[in-house]
C-alpha cells in the first residue's frame, strides 16, 4: 500500500476549557514555550511524512491559517534590517508541504469535523491529529515513533491505527478506553519503550473504572482508511446532537478491523488549563536549556 501523505487537524472548537485565554486567541495558538501548540502538531505530521495538511475550522479561526502563511510585509522588513535568520525561521514549512483550511460549517462534533475534510482529502487514506494533544518532541523521534510508526504499520497491513496510552485508574473516566481481545486483556505487560500495534475489539467512551475494559486510553492520533468517510456520512447524531467519530470507528472495526498502537513517550493536553500550564513550563525549560 502507498504511504499516507494527507492529514486532518480539526481546529473548530471554541476551547471553553481554556477561557478566558481562548476568548480572542484560538486555543491552538496559545504558546508552549516559544511556539504555539499547533506548531508542534504540524511539525509532528511533517516529520512523519505528511505532505498535505487540512485544517477544519470556522470563521473565527482564520488566525490559525494566517500563522502558516508567509507574511510578505513582515518578511521584507526583517530582511531589510538584516534579520534573515529570523525571517527564515518564520517561513519554516517545507516547500513540498501544503496547508489548506476548510470550514466545518456546523458544530456537530468530531466525526462531523473529520467528514468536513472529505472534499479535499477525497479518496486518500489519511491521518487525524487532535491539536489539543501535543506529544513530547524532546524525548521521541517524530520521524520514527508514534504517528510515523502508525503510518508505516498502515502501509504494511492496511489496518487503520489508533494511538493509545496507559492511564492511571483515577483518570480512566476521562477518556475513550480500548477494549482488547481476550488474549491481550492484561495490559500490564505492554512496554512503553517501543511502539507496538495489535488488534482492538472496540472502545468504551469515558467508562467508570469498574466498567473499563482496559487502562489504554485514546491519545488523539488516528490513521484511517478512506472508508471511514462512508461510515461518517451514514452515522446519525447521538450524544449531544453530535456525530461521534467513535461510532464510525466501531463500524470500521466490524468490517475491516482496526489496530491500536501503544504510545512512546509523553503527551500533554494543551486544551486543559492545568495540563497546559505544566506543558508550557516543560517546553520552556527544554528550550531555555537548548539556548544555553
Image: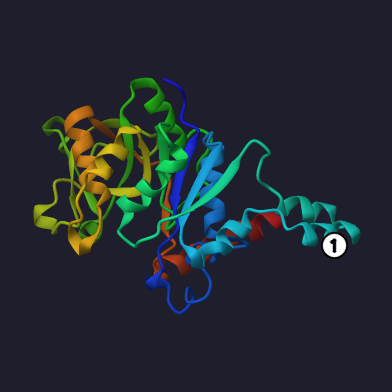
Hey, which residue is sitting farthest left in the picture? 210
Task: Please state which of residues 112 and 157 is positioned toward the viewer in this rendering.
Answer: 112
User: Is 122 situated left or right of 51 in this image?
Assistant: left
Q: Is residue 209 above or below residue 124?
A: below
Q: Is residue 139 above or below residue 194?
A: below
Q: Quadrant of residue 17?
A: bottom left
User: Is 49 situated left or right of 236 in this image?
Assistant: right
In the rendering, at what x and y percent does residue 101 appear?
A: 52, 51
Q: Which residue is mark 1?
A: 77
Tell me if residue 222 can be seen.
Answer: yes
Mark count: 1
Q: Residue at x 40, y 63 (%)?
A: 13
Q: Quadrant of residue 82?
A: bottom right
In the rendering, at what x and y percent does residue 41 appear?
A: 51, 50
- What quarter of the picture does the C terminus occupy? bottom right
Q: Residue at x 21, y 62 (%)?
A: 241
Q: Is residue 254 above or below residue 240?
A: above
- What quarter of the picture does the N terminus occupy? top left
In the rendering, at what x and y percent does residue 168 appear?
A: 25, 56
Q: Residues within 10 Å of mark 1 (few under 14, many from 20)?
A: few
Task: Please state which of residues 43 and 115 is positioned toward the viewer in this rendering.
Answer: 115
Element marked by disc 1: helix
Amino acid at each position: 500500500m502507498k504511504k499516507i501523505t494527507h492529514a486532518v487537524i480539526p481546529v473548530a472548537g471554541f476551547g471553553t476549557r481554556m477561557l478566558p485565554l481562548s476568548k480572542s486567541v484560538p486555543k491552538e495558538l496559545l504558546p508552549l514555550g516559544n511556539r504555539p501548540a499547533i506548531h508542534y502538531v504540524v511539525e509532528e505530521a511533517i516529520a512523519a511524512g505528511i505532505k498535505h495538511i487540512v485544517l477544519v475550522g470556522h470563521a473565527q479561526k482564520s488566525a490559525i491559517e494566517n500563522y502558516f502563511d508567509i507574511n510578505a510585509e513582515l518578511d521584507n522588513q526583517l530582511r531589510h534590517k538584516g534579520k534573515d535568520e529570523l525571517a527564515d525561521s518564520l517561513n519554516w514549512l517545507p516547500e513540498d508541504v501544503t496547508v489548506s483550511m476548510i470550514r466545518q460549517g456546523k458544530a456537530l462534533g468530531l466525526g462531523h469535523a473529520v467528514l468536513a475534510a472529505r472534499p479535499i482529502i477525497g479518496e486518500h487514506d489519511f491521518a487525524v491529529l487532535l491539536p489539543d494533544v501535543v506529544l513530547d518532541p524532546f524525548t521521541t523521534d517524530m520521524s520514527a515513533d508514534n504517528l510515523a510508526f502508525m503510518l508505516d504499520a498502515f502501509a504494511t497491513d492496511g489496518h487503520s491505527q489508533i494511538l493509545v496510552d496507559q492511564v492511571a485508574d483515577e483518570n480512566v473516566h476521562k477518556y475513550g478506553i480500548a477494549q482488547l481481545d481476550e488474549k491481550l486483556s492484561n495490559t500490564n505487560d505492554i512496554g512503553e519503550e517501543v511502539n507496538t500495534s495489535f488488534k482492538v475489539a472496540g472502545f468504551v467512551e469515558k467508562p467508570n473504572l469498574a466498567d473499563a475494559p482496559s487502562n489504554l486510553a485514546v491519545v488523539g492520533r488516528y490513521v484511517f482508511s478512506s472508508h471511514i468517510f462512508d461510515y461518517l456520512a451514514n452515522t446519525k447524531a447521538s450524544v449531544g446532537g453530535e456525530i461521534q467519530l467513535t461510532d464510525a470507528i466501531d463500524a470500521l472495526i466490524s468490517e475491516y478491523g482496526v489496530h491500536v498502537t501503544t504510545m512512546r513517550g509523553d503527551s500533554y493536553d494543551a486544551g486543559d488549563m492545568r495540563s497546559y500550564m505544566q506543558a508550557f513550563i516543560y517546553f520552556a525549560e527544554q528550550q531555555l536549556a537548548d539556548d544555553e
